[in-house]
């Protein structure tokens, strides 16, 4: 979930992950962020950046606004994915990384 703001139109997340455990497959919007433009790139092994922009203000706290699908490629540990830095409309914010169900 995304908190620390009343609502937002732009979001930038720098996310760290353990490349020996997981590999990012896709990033998509959900719920209140549906319709927003979203992009992502893997900067280097273990680091990715996600950007989102919306003409419509996305209310906060935004729960499940962005879903990131990872492929498990090794031993999965609780710390396999972690947030590093988040900016919402050019201000610092916080996110909560939650773990979904593992698909087989």
Image: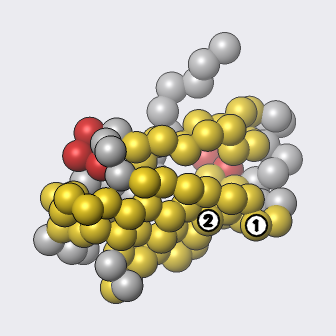
Q: Nearer the viewer, residue 10 or 24?
A: 10
Q: Is residue 52 above or below residue 4?
A: above
- Residue 71 percent location from the top left of the image: 71, 33
Name the residue rendered at 61%, 40% in the picture.
Answer: 26
Name the residue rendered at 42%, 77% in the picture.
Answer: 87
Query: Which numbered tag is attached to residue 99?
Result: none
Query: Dot 1: few (<14), some (14–19), or many (≥20) neighbours within 10 Å?
Result: few
Name the residue rendered at 83%, 60% in the picture.
Answer: 45
Instruction: Check disc 2 and report the residue beneath it.
Output: 49
Task: Report the side of 26 relative to 75 (left or right).
Answer: left
Name the residue rendered at 60%, 19% in the picture.
Answer: 103
Q: Is residue 41 above or below residue 27?
A: below
Query: Dot 2: few (<14), some (14–19), or many (≥20) neighbours within 10 Å?
Result: some
Rendered-image quadrant of the N terminus: bottom left
- Residue 59 percent location from the top left of the image: 16, 58
Q: Regarding mark 1 in the picture, which secondary structure is present there? A: strand
Q: Is residue 18 above or below residue 6?
A: above
Q: Regarding mark 2 in the picture, which secondary structure is present there? A: strand
Q: Nearer the viewer, residue 31 or 72?
A: 31
Q: Are marks 2 and 1 in contact (CB under 8 Å)?
A: yes
- Residue 48 percent location from the top left of the image: 67, 62
Task: Report the side of 51 relative to 30 (left or right).
Answer: right
Instruction: Check disc 1 and report the residue beneath it.
Output: 43
- Residue 64 percent location from the top left of the image: 34, 44
Task: Report the side of 12 relative to 71 (left or right).
Answer: left
| Sooner in the amino-acid sequence: mark 2 or mark 1 | 1
Residue closest to the far top: 104
Rendered-image quadrant of the C terminus: top right
Q: Is residue 83 visible?
A: no
Q: Is residue 36 visible?
A: yes
Residue closest to the far bottom: 91
């Amino acid at each position: 979930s995304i908190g620390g703001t009343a609502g937002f139109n732009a979001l930038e997340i720098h996310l760290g992950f353990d490349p020996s455990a997981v590999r990012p497959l896709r990033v998509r919007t959900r719920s209140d962020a549906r319709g927003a433009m979203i992009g992502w790139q893997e900067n280097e092994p273990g680091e990715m950046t996600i950007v989102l922009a919306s003409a419509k203000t996305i209310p906060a706290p935004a729960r499940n606004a962005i879903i990131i699908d990872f492929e498990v490629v090794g031993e999965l540990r609780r710390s396999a994915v972690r947030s590093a830095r988040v900016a919402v409309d050019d201000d610092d914010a916080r996110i909560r990384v939650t773990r979904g169900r593992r698909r087989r």
